[in-house]
Image (cartoon, rainbow, N blue to C red):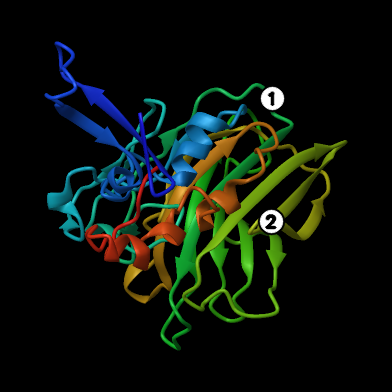
Amino acid sequence: MVVLAGALLLFAWATPSPTPSQPCIRSCHGVTRRLEQSDTVLRSALYRRITEVDTIRPLGYWSMEDPVNTAQTGAAVTTPSFAEAFGGPPIQFTSAVRMASQQAPGGSAPLPNVNEGIATGYAATRTASTNDFWAVQFAAVVRTANSTFVDTSLLQFSQGGSPTWASLELWIASSNGAFQVFDGVDGLTKLFEYIPTTTLYDGVWRYYTLTCEKSGTSVIFRLYINDTLVQSSTVVSTTMGAVSGVLPMPDDNFPATSGRSSFGHLGVYDQTPPTGHYTALIGHTGETRYWRTTTTDRQHTEGRPRITGAALW
């Protein structure tokens, strides 16, 4: 073992052990080696949080960070599919989606541009343990307001059992930028609405969590944006069911004139989701690694290469 300029360096000696006059260093592990590592991680911070850290697993989770195949990155893939993290059915699209082309917050890999995409068929979730609570989470960004936009549908999902509404649909209204929940069958019955103080059509990434909970003969909808509760509303004389399937970007979304831009990290739960997802999405200390992206001036003057890529520890 050798200590050099305050840095601990571990030497691995070749076999057989050399004599003092015949040193032979096989490998050296220290600060420089760590700085020179690739900045590529296997999966994003949010993906790892949901699939590896959380003690509560979702009934379905589609990160939509596909593809691993870099040849498809940014390309308009005509019939793409997005894998479910635990081996469930993928989300299928029937029209062009630009894979991994939208820069996402630091805790996520790039996500698809879905403005031209139309999904088809519900991707089934695993069986829920209760019909009394569900939660749907996703990250989304919609384009800056444009006078040509129509209402933007982000997600439709089905409820199992015998609920009052067999499916629900989430919209962002073009008139006032409100987040709305409609009956997904006729699209006419508005069940929930949150009108933000500033429009959601602003090109800013947000992390949405919508929950539904049984309360006697009523249900309570709650909307969280970036982990902050922004609206709670009760709908009386209503029967709910567990979420049984999801359909992002449904085909009634008028893609050419909608405001949607990118969407991902769709998760479905049958109990309160763990905290920390929004923190992981934006990239917390130790996950994004951006604060240690270069060598110091002292290291550079000592002859070490100028490193501009993030280092892994």
Q: Earlier in the sequence, mark 2 or mark 1?
A: 1
Residue occupying the far right of the picture: 216
Q: Amino acid type of disc 1?
A: Thr
Name above or below for residue 15 compared with residue 36.
Answer: above
Which picture quadrant has residue 256?
A: bottom left
Q: Which mark is residue 130?
A: 1
Name above or below for residue 306 compared with residue 129.
Answer: below
130 or 254: nearer the viewer: 130
Q: Secondary structure at mark 1?
A: loop
Relative side of 142 to 233, left or right: left
- Res. 312 in view: yes
Residue 96 position in % (x across, y down):
22, 58
Q: CA distance from mark 2 to mark 1?
A: 21 Å
* Badge nearest the viewer, 2 or 1: 2
Which picture quadrant has residue 114?
A: bottom left
Relative side of 192 to 282, left or right: right
Q: Quadrant of the N terminus?
A: top left
Residue name at image x 88 percent, y 36 percent: 216
Residue 236 position in % (x across, y down):
83, 48
Relative side of 62 to 127, left or right: left
How many dots with numbers? 2
**Which residue carries the number 2 mark?**
224
60 or 38: nearer the viewer: 38
Relative side of 136 to 1, left or right: right
- Res. 183 in view: no
Q: Amino acid type of disc 2?
A: Tyr
Q: Residues within 10 Å of mark 2 (few under 14, many from 20)?
A: some
Residue 311 position in % (x across, y down):
35, 50
Residue name at image x 21 percent, y 31 percent: 27
Q: Which mark is residue 164?
A: none
Residue name at image x 16 percent, y 19 percent: 14
